[in-house]
Image: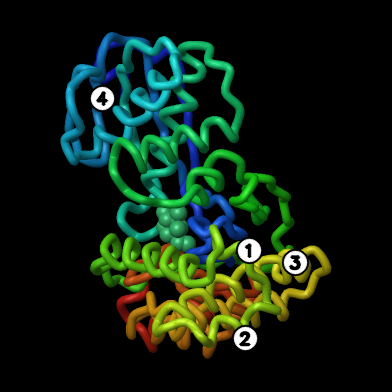
């Protein structure tokens, strides 16, 4: 593709995957615990060194150019420009990038197509300019690009999953210190990602409201982050004004579920892991209030048709669900779910 657009071969080809989160939702901006896994879908960046940005996006059939000093424009090129901005802010000499981008990660479904693009771009830049960056540096730079340049207030789960995750493993990540542990996914089971067919509505404003509510809960409790609380503190949360108590309760119980879930996977207790996924969904539905009637119906259909666990995944407000299904039941599962929920799209 690069050759067709620019008439020569690229110097490097880099890639990075999208992710699906198995457990630990809305915890990463509360210094909490998450358990995502990379998807077998990647974003590819074929690239060469250049002055300024010149990028072709195959998914949009669009070529865009931009000087490094030009401001962000609210388009897809911002993600690449943000990576260069984040590197240059740290003092790295990176004059620009000529690239061709192709993504297999579905966009706008909560599967971190933006993190995949950022991580793939930073990997390409690392190779092109010989930058001394490890997986953690890449994840941090990618998050800086997204939060400070693109302007989306996300946590660091997506960028870490894309940069440090491994196919076939859950990445147990403590967002307080970025320590990680790889947890093998159970053999004979499939991680089914099923889109609800409903675009995420009000996701950004809803996400920012939830973040603010968590900050308010901390202010009431006189703590700096909800991570300071454990299950033993749940009774204290009852004195918080509505809905802050329920928001905080979700975060505290979700952190506990992630730890218990990682243990369950490591000890081969797949059914227990499934129970925790369902408990997570219910907590997101009733305490955190980021589910939708469609996501609830889809999760119920998945459970009815043999999933050992299912839940909404990502920020919520629409988008995708994740379910754990025995490989041998997968076909019957898909058929049954489609009968009950015809708009379901299986990834
Ligand atoms: C989005 C954000 C993540 C995380 C999830 C909710 O995907 O990008 O950082 O906060 O929502 O768990």
Q: Please report whichever mark, 4 or 2, sits nearer to the chain's N-terminal start.
A: 4
Q: Do the residues labelled 3 and 2 touch (CB within 8 Å)?
A: no
Point out the image quarter for the N terminus. Answer: top left
Q: Please report whichever mark, 3 or 4, sits nearer to the chain's N-terminal start.
A: 4
Residue 94's disc number:
none
Instruction: Give the image quadrant in which the ligand numbered 1 is located.
Output: bottom left
Q: Which residue is drawn at 39% across and 27% down?
A: 86
Cα gap from disc 3 to disc 4, whole angstroms: 42 Å
Image quadrant in which you'd find residue 94: top left
What residue is shown with label 3?
265
Q: Which residue is drawn at 34% across and 36% down?
A: 102
Q: Please state the horizontal and vertical placement of residue 145, each as a whole percent of the image.
A: 37, 35
What residue is shown with label 2?
235
Q: Is residue 296 visible?
A: yes
Image quadrant in which you'd find residue 204: bottom left
> Left or right: where does residue 249 sit relative to residue 216?
right
Up the image or down, 146 lies above or below 53; here it is: below
């Amino acid at each position: 593709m690069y050759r067709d657009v620019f008439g020569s071969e690229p110097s490097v080809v880099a890639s990075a995957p999208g992710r699906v989160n198995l457990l630990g939702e809305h915890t990463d901006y509360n210094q909490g615990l998450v358990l995502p896994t990379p998807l077998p879908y990647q974003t590819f960046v074929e690239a060469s060194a250049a002055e300024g940005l010149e990028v072709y996006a195959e998914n949009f059939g669009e070529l865009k150019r931009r000087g490094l000093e030009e401001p962000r424009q609210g388009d897809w090129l911002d993600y690449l420009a943000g990576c260069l901005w984040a590197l240059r802010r740290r003092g790295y000499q990176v004059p620009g990038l000529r690239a061709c981008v192709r993504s297999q990660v579905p966009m706008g479904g909560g599967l971190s197509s933006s993190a995949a693009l950022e991580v793939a771009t930073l990997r390409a830049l690392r190779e092109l300019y010989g930058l001394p960056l490890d997986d953690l540096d890449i994840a941090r730079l990618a998050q800086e690009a997204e939060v400070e340049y693109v302007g989306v207030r996300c946590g660091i789960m997506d960028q870490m999953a894309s940069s440090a995750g491994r196919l076939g493993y859950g990445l147990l990540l403590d967002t307080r210190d970025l320590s990680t542990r790889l947890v093998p996914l159970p053999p004979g089971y499939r991680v089914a990602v099923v889109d609800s067919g409903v675009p995420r509505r009000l996701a950004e404003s809803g996400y920012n409201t939830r973040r603010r509510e968590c900050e308010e809960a901390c202010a009431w409790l006189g703590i700096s982050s909800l991570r300071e609380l454990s299950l033993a503190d749940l009774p204290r949360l009852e004195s918080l004004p509505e809905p802050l108590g329920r928001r905080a309760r979700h975060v505290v119980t979700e952190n506990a579920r992630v730890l218990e879930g990682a243990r369950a996977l490591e000890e081969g207790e797949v059914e227990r892991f499934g129970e925790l996924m369902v408990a997570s969904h219910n907590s997101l539905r009733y305490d955190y209030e980021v589910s939708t009637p469609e996501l609830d119906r889809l999760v119920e259909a998945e459970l009815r048709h043999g999933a050992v666990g299912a839940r909404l995944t990502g920020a919520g407000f629409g988008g995708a669900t994740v379910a754990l299904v025995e490989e041998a039941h997968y076909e019957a599962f898909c058929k049954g779910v489609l009968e009950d929920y015809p708009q379901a799209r299986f990834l």
